[in-house]
Amino acid sequence: MKLSTVFLYGPSGSGKSTIGGLLAENLSLPFVDLDVEIEARSGMPISEIFASQGEARFREWERTTLELILTSNEQVIALGGGALTVPETRHLAESAGDVILLHAAPDALVARLQADDEPRPLLTGDARQKLDAMLARRGEHYASFERQLDTTRLSPVDAAWELQILLGRYHLKAMPPGYDVRVQPGGLDDLGALMQARGLNGPVAVVTDENVGALYLPRALHSLQKSGYAARGITIPAGETYKTLDTVSKLWDGFLSAKIERRSTVIGLGGGVVGDLAGFAAATFLRGVPWVAVPTSLLSMVDASMGGKTGADLPQGKNLIGAFHPPRLVLADPEVLATLPEEELRSGM
């Protein structure tokens, strides 16, 4: 799995810097404006670099500066409007994360540029004429990016939210320090890498039930082992009937056999019952160990895996014992819903 940096790209006025700052805040990630970084490193405004060194040299500044600021940590980076016209720079960005092209109607771009005092070296003079020429020149290049967002009629706040939907990335802050939610088709195969990126440690115990385990436990274990984790599965019977303290006690025994320590990680791979039990067992083992929710039903993706609610049932009623123990990560892979019966999909809806 490649790094998870988000790159915003597109013509001047499409909103890369403004929207990028909001997106980074929403995701609790650092934000970097590549032009600002170039000015800081070169000691010159962008317009002066263009005037004294030319566009070709500026493109070299973009590539080398991008190489310097890329790290193993996730971040949001706003790119200049022509940065990825250089194949080497485009390869660098696409190898490090997701590139989203922002665009807008020419009238909207011109209006935004006129309201902005920042000089645009390639648009000096008749801004509309220069912009039309630039869009025509780069039209095929911009169209080559698969993920795009039209910001013409979107406020920056709404655009940032639409980007989160497009990316399937969220950060829930209600329970500090918060945790990430990823909605990622095929994400089960990246489980180990996503955990690694968040500094989660092994050994890892994967709690699942007989139904889900038969379908997805081998994939989860393979992903974890591929990322260097020592991992083992703990399978429990399926169904609400087994959402009991007796099952929790068996999970604790399984954690001991898996050599789970306070800095280890527990994963709940399954529907709401598995998630509640795995989270509660994690909350109460060694006074609390980190855990990750990998919901496999639609209902658990939109409800049970959110908010850090964990627990078990008593004979007198549901969820009478439990704890608020937020996961470090929620990974929802929509592809696993293909194996759900229709009534379970309707329940989630």
Image (cartoon, rainbow, N blue to C red):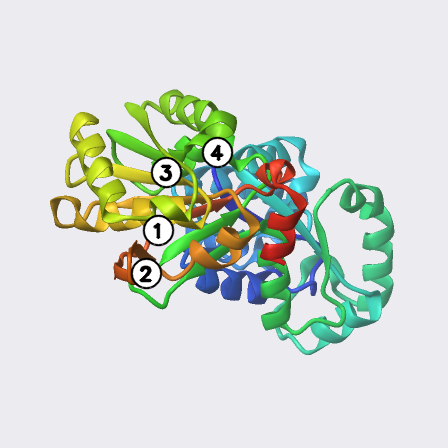
Q: Is residue 313 above or below residue 257?
A: below
Q: Nearer the viewer, mark 2 or mark 4?
A: 2
Which comes before the other along the chain, label 2 or label 4?
4
Closest to the observer, 266 or 117: 266
Residue ID for mark 3: 195
Q: Tell me: residue 299, above or below residue 140.
A: below
Please identify, in this view, whether the residue under mark 1 or under mark 3 is nearer the observer. 1
Secondary element at image label 3: helix
Alpha-carbon span between mark 1 and mark 4: 15 Å
* Mark 2, secondary structure of its residue: strand
Pick the residue in front: 41 or 326.
Answer: 326
Q: Which mark is residue 276?
A: 1
Tag 1–tag 2 contact (CB < 8 Å): yes
**Tag of residue 212:** 4
Residue 1 seen in the current view: no
**Percent x, y for residue 340?**
61, 40
| Visible residue check, residue 81 | yes
SS category of the residue bearing label 1: helix
Pinpoint residue 334: horizontal percent, then vertical percent: 60, 43
- Can you say which quadrant of the picture contains the C terminus? bottom right
- Mark nearest the camera among 1 and 2 is 2
Does residue 179 appear to the left or right of 36 in the view shown?
left
Q: Amino acid at mark 4?
A: Val
